[in-house]
Image (cartoon, rainbow, N blue to C red):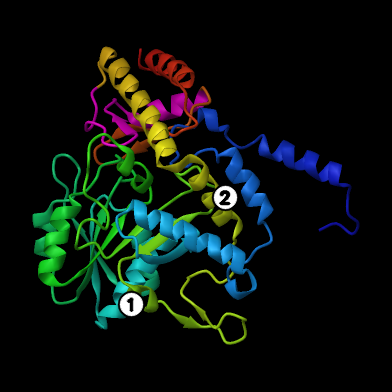
Amino acid sequence: MDETGVTETEVLGLLRRIKERDMPFERILSSMCTMPHPLAIQAHMEFIETNLGDPTLFPGTKGLEESVIAMLSALLHAPNAHGYITTGGTESNIQAIRAARNLSGKKNPNVIVPGSAHFSFDKAADILGIKIKKAQLDESLKVDPASVEMLIDENTIALVGTAGTTEFGQVDPIDELSKIALSRDIFLHVDAAFGGLVIPFLEEEYPFDFKVKGVSSLTIDPHKMGAGTIPSSALLFRDEACLGALATSTPYLASRMQHTLAGTRTGASIAATYAVFKHLGQSGYKRIVARCMKLVSMIEKRVADMGIPLVIQPVTNVIALRVDSPEEVASKLRERNWYVSTTLRPKSLRLVIMPHITEEILNTFLTDLREILG
């Protein structure tokens, strides 16, 4: 901090120059986030000062959070679900496992996750002092229920399934995991951080939410396919007792209890999510998802003409291409100002087709990809 300040104009100019170093969204095909809806940005700024760390002081904003939870609960077939808005899928997943741990009372708890699970569960293990067991995947890169069942022991407190895996967009067999969880009386968490606002709007149905009887909790991120502002995830529980397992006394605040991991919480992204949910409705999201999947189909046809096979048939708007030396290809694409990612098992070039991607962008990208591959 300087001894004396500078003008607002100078500061804003400095910020604009710094932001120019960031990658432009229209060249990013690796992120599961997108440009927020303009209405979401406007709503965010209207509530920029709100702090739901002490919701008694902000009853209007707290009401918006309750409305968002209600809208998500209805979409996910649990109109009476309980939960709150978090800072992202990582916090939601950590809190879900924390609730399962607190409810179990076991001294040496373990959680069984797919081999494809998000790295947030490794963070949860480190923070919560639990063991993570990773189940095998089948040929389509879904978790193998038989492998899950073999890993269960007397200290298993939760099973995890993913609805929209980070690397390949695949949906685990949540209905099969549910049968196992119900038969063993084990908590079942679904990480639908990405897929939660994709799968309900696909033409093909995939059982993944609270309609599946054994699902105990679910993570879903409006700041991904919801086009909300960052940070905005939601953690939903079927039963109120699960939320109660996260309660902490806050005696010096106007609100006497918190169930959240973060103390101070912005109400701005909650207002943004509320605004875009109300504006778009389910029909709006169905159009967005249909458009993204149409672009995925376009890529499928173009890469087939180029002789590039797919790792799996895309389930959501994530497509993985089997190319030789994907890291080298990604590096060459970066030289042309394209930002893609690669996967490890199996190795591939990974593309996420978010709402900011257009047919024109993809035509340019695929032309460059063809030239790079020769």
Identify the magenta region: 309-335
Q: Position of residue 269 (x, y in %)?
A: 57, 54
User: For the point 55% across and 48% down, which residue is it?
Assistant: 275
Circle 1: element type: helix
Between 272 and 145, the residue placed more toward the observer is 272
- Measure the alpha-carbon separation of dots 1 and 2: 29 Å
Question: Which residue is identified by label 2?
Answer: 272
Between 363 and 6, the residue placed more toward the observer is 363
Residue 100 badge? none
Q: Position of residue 138 (x, y in %)?
A: 14, 45
In this view, the residue farthest toward the bottom is 251
Between 235 and 16, the residue placed more toward the observer is 235
Between 366 and 318, the residue placed more toward the observer is 318
**Is residue 54 one of those drawn in magenta?**
no
**In this image, 202 relative to 43: left or right?**
left
* Mark 2: few/some/many CA within 10 Å (<14, 14-19, 20+): many
Q: Is residue 14 above or below residue 295?
A: below
Question: Which residue is identified by label 1?
Answer: 241
Q: Quadrant of the N terminus?
A: bottom right
Q: Is residue 209 above or below residue 292?
A: below
Q: Inspect the image, locate mark 1, and give the three-letter code of the amino acid beneath it.
A: Ala
Q: Position of residue 220 (x, y in %)?
A: 39, 53
Circle 2: element type: helix
User: For the point 85% across and 46% down, which residue is it?
Assistant: 8
Residue 370, by quadrant, is top left
Q: Can residue 110 be seen at all in this image of the molecule?
A: yes
Q: Can residue 129 be seen at all in this image of the molecule?
A: no
Residue 214, by quadrant, is bottom left
* Mark 1: few/some/many CA within 10 Å (<14, 14-19, 20+): few
Q: Position of residue 201 (x, y in %)?
A: 33, 39
Q: Is residue 168 above or below residue 63?
A: above
Q: Is residue 286 above or below residue 221?
A: above
